[in-house]
Image (tube, rainbow, N blue to C red):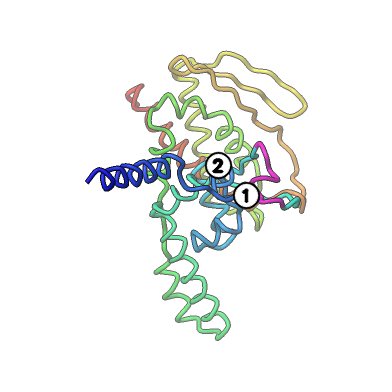
């Protein structure tokens, strides 16, 4: 009937207006707050130790972020916390190298158990089963083209030249130092062969070099010969993680450069 049609029309209008108005969101559940995650929450989400979390962030090129409204993001907490983009942490969930970190952590537990029991036979057997991982896929992911790798080669060359001058102390593995020396010598041989050197400058810090490769200017610094001190203020653990990634990157770059000269 007519009254029934009017009632039905009113109900439809009421439902439509409610849908258009939407559900009222509570404070702190939308907007900029949902874009960030604290470091402790990220470590818990990835199920990693803080050391492995720092390692994976350095390897993948993920760094802390500074929000525009920090107090709002931290839900009123005035204490400064380390924040990351939530999308970056979710991106790390699908990184296969995380499983290698977990395997290495389990391996170290077994090794410590064997050492505590002074079981040398078990220790030698476990050393042959030590898990390894490669960073090739991360290099290809961060640098999809060779030009991108050349643009970001300043810091890798600086750190590799620094490590090549270090002595084999207990905080710096000998294999890392030897690999840095080999890669830097190979790169300098390419510079000589391709006549790519453009500028050289000597300062108190060291020798500044600038080369031009495929239209890209690359500038780095090589330190003076020095007697290094056992300085506790330098975080060699972080530097070794960077060196680990830069060695892989420079190896790819040298291979491509030598291939371009047919040598």
Q: Is residue 205 left or right of residue 121?
A: right
Lateral position of residue 149 relative to residue 230, left or right:
left
Q: Which residue is mark 2?
A: 31
Point 49% across, 45% down: residue: 88
Position in image of residue 169 (x %, y %) = 66, 54
Q: Position of residue 197 (x, y in %)?
A: 54, 16
Q: Position of residue 218 (x, y in %)?
A: 55, 22
> Relative to residue 39, is residue 234 drawn left or right?
right
Measured as percent of width and height from the top left, residue 21 is found at 46, 41
Q: Quadrant of the C terminus?
A: top left
Query: In the rendering, which numbered label is found on residue 5?
Result: none
The magenta stretch spans which residues? Answer: 68-76
Q: Quadrant of residue 126?
A: bottom left
How far apart are the alpha carbons under marks 1 and 2?
A: 34 Å
Residue placed most toward the observer, 30 or 146: 30
Q: Which residue is at the far left? A: 1
* Disc 1 packing (10 Å; few <14; some 14–19; many ≥20): some
Say how many tags the image has.
2
Q: Which residue is mark 1?
A: 238
Q: Is residue 71 magenta?
A: yes
């Amino acid at each position: 009937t007519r009254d029934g049609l009017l009632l039905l029309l009113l109900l439809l209008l009421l439902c439509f207006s409610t849908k258009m108005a939407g559900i009222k969101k509570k404070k702190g559940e939308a907007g900029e707050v949902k874009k960030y995650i604290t470091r402790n929450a990220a470590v818990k989400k990835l199920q990693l130790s803080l050391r492995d979390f720092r390692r994976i962030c350095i390897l993948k090129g993920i760094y802390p972020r500074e929000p525009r409204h920090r107090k709002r993001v931290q839900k009123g907490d005035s204490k400064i916390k380390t924040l990351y983009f939530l999308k970056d942490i979710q991106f790390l969930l699908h990184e296969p190298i995380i499983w290698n970190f977990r395997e290495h952590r389990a391996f170290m537990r077994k090794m410590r158990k064997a050492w505590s029991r002074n079981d040398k036979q078990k220790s030698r057997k476990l050393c042959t089963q030590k898990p390894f991982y490669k960073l090739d896929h991360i290099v290809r992911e961060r640098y999809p083209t060779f030009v991108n790798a050349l643009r970001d080669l300043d810091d890798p060359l600086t750190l590799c030249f620094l490590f090549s001058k270090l002595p084999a102390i207990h905080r710096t593995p000998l294999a890392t130092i030897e690999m840095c020396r080999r890669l830097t010598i190979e790169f300098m041989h390419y510079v000589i062969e391709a006549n790519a050197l453009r500028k050289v400058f000597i300062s108190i810090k060291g020798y500044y070099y600038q080369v031009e490769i495929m239209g890209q200017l690359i500038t780095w610094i090589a330190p003076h010969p020095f007697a290094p001190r056992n300085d506790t203020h330098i975080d060699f653990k972080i530097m070794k993680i960077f060196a680990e990634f830069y060695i892989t990157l420079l190896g790819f770059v040298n291979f491509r450069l030598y291939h371009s000269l047919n040598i």
